[in-house]
Image (spheres, grey):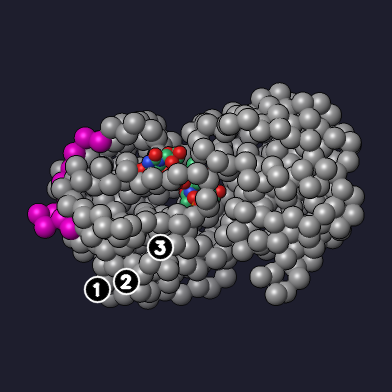
Amino acid sequence: MSKLLIQGPSRLKGEIRVHGAKNSTLPLMAASLLCDSTCVLHNCPVLSDVKTSEKILQHLGCRTGRSGSDVLIDPRGVEQSDIPEHLMREMRSSIVFLGAILSRMGRAELSFPGGCELGPRPIDLHLSALRKMGVTIQEDHGCLKCSAPEGLKGVQIAFSFPSVGATENVLLAACCAGGTTTITNAAREPEICDLADFLNCCGAKISGAGDSTIVIEGVKSLHGCEHEVIPDRIAAATYLAATAATGGSIILNHVVPEHLAPVLPLFEESGCRFAIHEKEIYMSAPSRLGRIKNVRTMPYPGFPTDAQAPMMAMAAVANGTSIFVENIFESRYKHVGELLRLGANIKVEGRVAVVEGVGRLSGAPVEAADLRGGAALVVAGLAAQGETLVSGVRHIDRGYECLEENLCLLGAQVKRLPD
Ligand SMILES: CC(=O)N[C@H]1[C@@H](OP(=O)(O)OP(=O)(O)OC[C@H]2O[C@@H](n3ccc(=O)[nH]c3=O)[C@H](O)[C@@H]2O)O[C@H](CO)[C@@H](O)[C@@H]1O
Ligand SMILES: C=C(OP(=O)(O)O)C(=O)O
């Protein structure tokens, strides 16, 4: 297992291009299964999860190819309807293939998905919505045998929580279903809009994506298209947090500033200054950050849970007390114990973390237990005095393309140590 060796502290300074969004690319790859001709996705990041999605598509019978950041998917040869368990376990997004496979094949066989361990991550909302659409699902020791012998039918779906993955699964299942599907309390994340934009470009009839009510009129078939994946707002927020924690300045290229609207005010609150021009954000941080009073994770357009851990690493070196409340996942504070090893002062009680900023962190060996928690350890290591050795890097590699190269471009001293 490779490790990241960080020699801190650094003051990050420079310019980077933000890669395409992992959480858009994966459902878009699943969506290509619905098409009867080739799809080209531009701006796909090189990440282990994207590789896993390619393996799933190939297993199902697609031809896939990559050239730079373009991924080409030819779904014409699809003849399988199952996903092997080891691929299901690799990532959470493997579950959004369910809606797409059912739509294409009328049946699907897979198991419960993996992904970051953030407390219980049930898929009850996905399954009950699909059952309502006419799918018979047999659950047996974590295996799911699904079939829709009469085809999928458009229905009214009211989610009790705006689940991102369940909204994506219903979008995928509903595009070519018989009749109209209406989702209320749908997730509103930018990645949902990206998926709907792609599907509409392929001939689907989806309206309302980005609002709580989405209406999908079933169509007979979809054709392939070319589509550019939106920039990764969580990677962008992570680079901003690393820059702020080190008192640096950064230009982020190729971002959608609007997607970062829930996080930018917190950087401003801590004393960072911004200049925003079209797809570019310039931020400069003070040499000592001020505290962020409250960070409450919420569904979009609230503060994203995926940015909570990197932001906490930044708050750990701010002047004053910051309070975090994690409302989306039950157990998303696994980074806290590791931040304590670096000298942070953080107390957790249930869903609340109280972060007393300290003047300086100091380097230590730490272990990433999940993707964003791992990114938080990198942020903290950049601000810490001395050597920080981060293990569990495979979690981080699920979500950040060329992380150490980008950080080195910004002036950090980060090295990947091979196995
Ligand atoms: C690959 C991907 O896009 N992952 C993102 C997606 O995950 P994911 O799609 O898994 O997140 P959801 O929005 O579905 O989950 C949010 C909450 O709803 C609960 N829930 C969800 C589904 C369900 O059937 N039953 C249920 O109870 C979950 O346990 C969790 O507490 O959105 C999360 C919330 O923004 C992000 O942190 C993840 O990075
Ligand atoms: C939690 C995440 O990913 P996943 O849902 O794939 O575990 C994430 O991207 O932060």
Disc 2 versus disc 3: nearer the observer: 3
Going by the picture, which residue comes out furthest to the top? Answer: 293
Rendering quarter of residue 265 = top right
Which of the marked residues, 2 or 3, is nearer the chain's N terminus?
2
Q: Identify which amino acid the numbered label 3 is placed on.
A: Met
Please name the residue that numbered disc 3 is placed on.
88
Q: Are marks 1 and 2 in contact (CB under 8 Å)?
A: yes
Please name the residue that numbered disc 2 is placed on.
60
Residue 220 can be seen in this image: no
Residue 136 counted in the magenta span: no
Q: How far across and how far down the image is residue 317, in percent?
A: 82, 37
Label 1 vs label 3: CA separation? Answer: 18 Å
Q: Quadrant of the C terminus?
A: bottom right
| Mark 2 surroundings: few (<14), some (14-19) or many (≥20) residues within 10 A | many
At a point 58% along the width and 50% down the height, the residue shown is 232
Magenta part of the protein: which range? 147-157
Which of the marked residues, 1 or 2, is nearer the chain's N terminus?
2
Q: Identify which amino acid the numbered label 1 is placed on.
A: Glu
Q: How far across and how far down the image is residue 362, in percent?
A: 87, 48
Q: How far across and how far down the image is residue 120, in percent?
A: 45, 44
Which of the marked residues, 1 or 3, is nearer the chain's N terminus?
1
Please name the residue that numbered disc 1 is placed on.
79
At a point 52% along the width and 50% down the height, the residue shown is 117
Q: Identify which amino acid the numbered label 2 is placed on.
A: Leu
Label 2 vs label 3: CA separation? Answer: 13 Å
Rendering quarter of residue 325 = top right
Residue 298 can be seen in this image: yes
Q: Is residue 260 left or right of residue 412?
A: left
Label 1 vs label 2: CA separation? Answer: 6 Å
